[in-house]
Every structure is written in structure tokens, then in C-alpha cells.
Image (cartoon, rainbow, N blue to C red):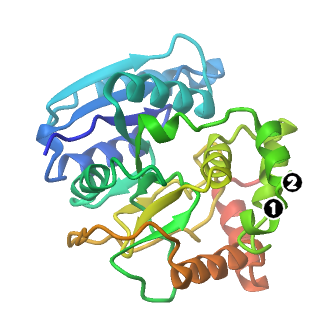
Amino acid sequence: MNPAPLLLFAYNRLKHTKGTIEALQKNNLAGATELFVFSDNAKKEIDQAAVSEVRNYIKTVKGFKEVYIFERDSNFGLGKNIIDGVTRIVNERGRAIVLEDDLITSPFFLEYINQGLEIYENEETVASIHGYCYPVTKKLPETFFIRGADCLGWGVWKRSWSLFEPDGNKLLQKLVDSKQTSLFDYNDSYPFTQMLRDQIAGKNNSWAIRWYASAFINNKFTLYPGRSLVFHAGGDGSGTNVGIDDVYDVGLSFTPIKMTKLEVRQNEEAYKAFEQFQYKLSHPPLLYRVRRKLKQLFIHPAN
């Protein structure tokens, strides 16, 4: 196996970046994998010291075949940093594995993603291989397909990333014209369409909602593992797009995912489980809302 290049997008969170790197170093294929780190520059002067700490640490990283560092001269922001970095590497190498600096991986993450990239390389209907699985209550198959794309630890090919449409207006128009906004929202369970509208209005700069919409509109599918190989550690309020929240917390799988080639079609039972999870996200019970508010007040008390 010739491992795909691994892209890590970092900013100013040294603790998170270390956690992500140290978990990756324990992956079985780390020593055979080239690591590309895209380090964004400070948005504000107050963040410069933290950005420098991350950059100094990255220069010491070992345990990979090669480590390449791209230090942005100006602040790109998360969306532009990822879009530019992924586009650059897939155009050069044909495929890539993508991680942000708050994702902790299982030792079998790289093996799973690389296997998926090889098995489905010539399947035009497959957009990506995803390493995270939502904490649903239903037992899921070892691997399965869901229409669209996702953002928490994934592998992609040049052929599928070429479908990425950065213009949210174009994506929204296609969703509306084809009368698919309800399906896009997991049967009205979660307001993804509104998230896209907010991106258009400048209320967020989410690359992920545009990636999901791009794959969805083109009727492409993403492979998920039935057990999560990624833990999202960014629910502590330190990230760009996620506040203080443990709703995405999962138990990492420390056994490999058994990869067999599947027919590319949506697994309806898994989709239903995801739909229920998305509904829970958008309709949290009162006790959960109170607990989340208390966490916010405790970690970021009012001045």
C-alpha cells in the first residue's frame, strides 16, 4: 500500500495540535505517510504568540515519512486554509487524507482511510471515505454509505474534490430548484439548508456545508465506519465553528475496521440512525440545554 498524503490544518491550539499529532504517530502507517501541515497565521496580534508556539512545535515532529510545513503569511481562516490546501495537494498527488487540529484518531485510522481510497478509487459515485461515526444508539454495519460528504477526518480523490463548489449561492439554488432541501436536511431533522444560507450571508464561513452540498447535489456517497476511528476534541469552546459541547463525543475503536467492497448505495438503516441523531442535535432536551449553558458559564464566565 502506498499511503495517501496526510493533511493537517492547524492554527493556535498547541495542546490540541499535539494531541492530534501524537495520536497519528501511533497509527500503523504513520512511518510510511507524508504529513503536510498547513499552519494559518494569526487573525489578531493577540493570537500571534500561540500561532508561533504551534509552528515551533510542528518543526520538531517526527515519526512520519516526511513532514512538510506550509506557514501562511496572512490569516486565511479555516475555510480558505482547508479549501486551498486540499486543492493544492490533490491536484499534485491525486488524493489526500484531511484532518483538523482537534481530531484524535484511532491507531487504525490511516489504514482504514487508505484501504477505502484504494478500493473505491474508480467508483465515480463515491465522494469520500470518512473516519468519524456519529454516536448513534443503533448498532451499525462495519462500513456503509450515506449520500453527501462529511468533515471529521476523511479521505478524498482529485476526481471527487473537483466537484467542490465554493459558491454557496449556486449550491442553494440547485437544492431549491430540485426540491431537495428537505432531504438535504435529513428529512427536516437538522437545518443544513439554513446553515448554507448563513454561509451565503457571511454569518459563517463553513467549507464543510459547501462540501456536503457539493457531494449531495451530484448524488455522490461517502463511506462511513460502523465504529468511530476519530474523536472530536474541539467541543471545549476552543474551535472556530464549535462551541462547548460534548454531543459529538464517541468511544474510539481500537480494533481495525474490516473493509470489504460494497455496492454503492445508501444504507437506509444507518441513514435513519443519523437522521435521529441530527434531530436530537437540533431539538436538545431542556436538561441538556441547561447543562451546556452551565459549561459555557464555567469555562468562559462573563466579564
Q: Who is closer to the viewer here, 299 or 279? A: 279
Residue 145 appears left or right of 203: left
Q: Where, by quadrant of the figure, is residue 8 drawn?
A: top left
Q: Is residue 31 left or right of residue 162?
A: left
Q: Which residue is mark 1?
A: 181
Q: Is residue 291 visible?
A: no
Query: To which residue does mark 2 refer?
Result: 176
- In the rendered view, tell whether residue 183 sits above or below residue 99: below
Within 10 Å of disc 1 (Cα), the crowding (few <14, some 14-19, many 20+) is some
Query: Where residue 109 appears, x then y in whole percent?
Result: 28, 57
Give, as a three-letter code, the residue at label 2. Answer: Val
Q: Position of residue 64 (x, y in %)?
A: 16, 35
Foreground residue among 57 and 130: 130
The answer to whether mark 2 and mark 1 are in CB contact below 8 A is yes
Residue in the image at 38% along x and 81% along y: 141
Tell me residue 55's x, y (percent): 38, 23
Number of residues whose C-alpha sits closer than 10 Å to that of mark 2, classed few (under 14), some (14–19) or many (20 or more)? few
In 3D space, how far apart are the residues under numbered discs 2 and 1 (Cα atoms)? 6 Å
- Of callouts 2 and 1, which one flags the residue occurring earlier in the amino acid sequence? 2
Q: Position of residue 280 (x, y in %)?
A: 69, 79
Q: Is residue 274 left or right of residue 10?
A: right
